[in-house]
Amino acid sequence: MTTERFRRLRRRGDGEAWHAVQLARHQDRPYTLDYLARMCDDFLELHGDRAEGDDAAVVSGIGSFRGQTVAFVGHQKGRDLKQRTYRNFGMPSPEGYRKAMRVFAIAARLGFPVVTLIDTPGAAPGVRAEERGQSGAIARSQLTLMGLRVPVVACVIGEGSSGGALAFGIADRVLMQQNAIYTVISPEGCAAILWKDAGEARRAAAALRPTADACLALGVVDAIVPEPSGGAHRDHAKAAELLGDAIQIELDVLSSIPPPQRRAARRAKFRDMGAFVE
């Protein structure tokens, strides 16, 4: 997209960015398991990282998707306080990333394409997560995805914030739902750093420009997936149908590209991000 289009997006004001944040966080918005239940004929969830334990903030496994076997990995939030606590509000620990890498390895060995569903306010920020190698786990997840010979499609389905999102965001094609957000840090985190006040989140959202249109203009994502009128929370079934259609289109195209060429293009795609000409 052109620089002029991105400048027009910046002039739309604070309201649109904050509205997108609210929609991406809507309590009734479909989560990973909601989509898998509707997109897959069956889904076998795999648990545990074979080292520390199982992280409920990450769902990973193998599913039957429109006639083909696909490896799915995604963040999972909860609907009520008990579920949210169990899922750690969708914020993964190192165990979650290692569990995901188990599934990536299975996909590579058996030739299954990989689809990731991104919806997290960020990686778990606690001391225990850091002690167990949080940053290294995120980096290894990215490295693993970068090297896969099978097709990889990433989909931002809600919040896509910080390293928690980037760990699953390396892909041949990155899709983003119409009312999702994708940014290097949550608006609250950004506000706390810049203005020492998380209450300035609305102001931070305006600066971050996390909307789908802005991310497409910047080249951070490759396509925007439409949602039902009013947002995905209004109609889970329709949202899943639209997302499934977009994923199928990308997998069909990617499967026709030789693995070495596909992997080289994946590397070039991310190396080119942020490059500019004066």
Image (cartoon, rainbow, N blue to C red):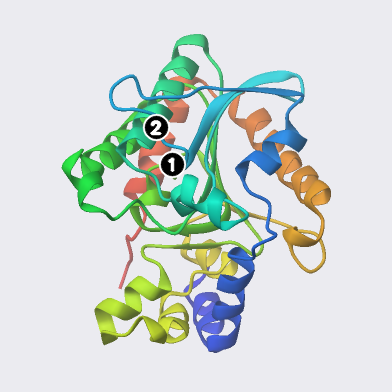
Q: Residue at x 73, y 57 (%)?
A: 226
Q: Is residue 266 above or below residue 156?
A: above
Q: Is residue 10 left or right of residue 269?
A: right
Q: Give the SS element for disc 2.
A: helix
Q: What's the amino acid at mark 2?
A: Leu
The picture quadrant where one finds residue 115 is: top right
x, y percentage for residue 250?
64, 37
Q: Which residue is mark 1?
A: 168
Q: Give the SS element for disc 1.
A: loop
Q: Residue at x 69, y 43 (%)?
A: 34
Task: Report if residue 8 is visible in the image.
Answer: yes
The picture quadrant where one finds residue 204 is: bottom left
Q: Nearer the viewer, mark 1 or mark 2?
A: 1
Looking at marks 1 and 2 on the same chain, the residue that comes earlier in the sequence is marked by 2
| Pick the front one: 49 or 191 | 49
Decide: few, some or many residues near mark 1? Use Cα within 10 Å; few <14, some 14-19, many ≥20.
many
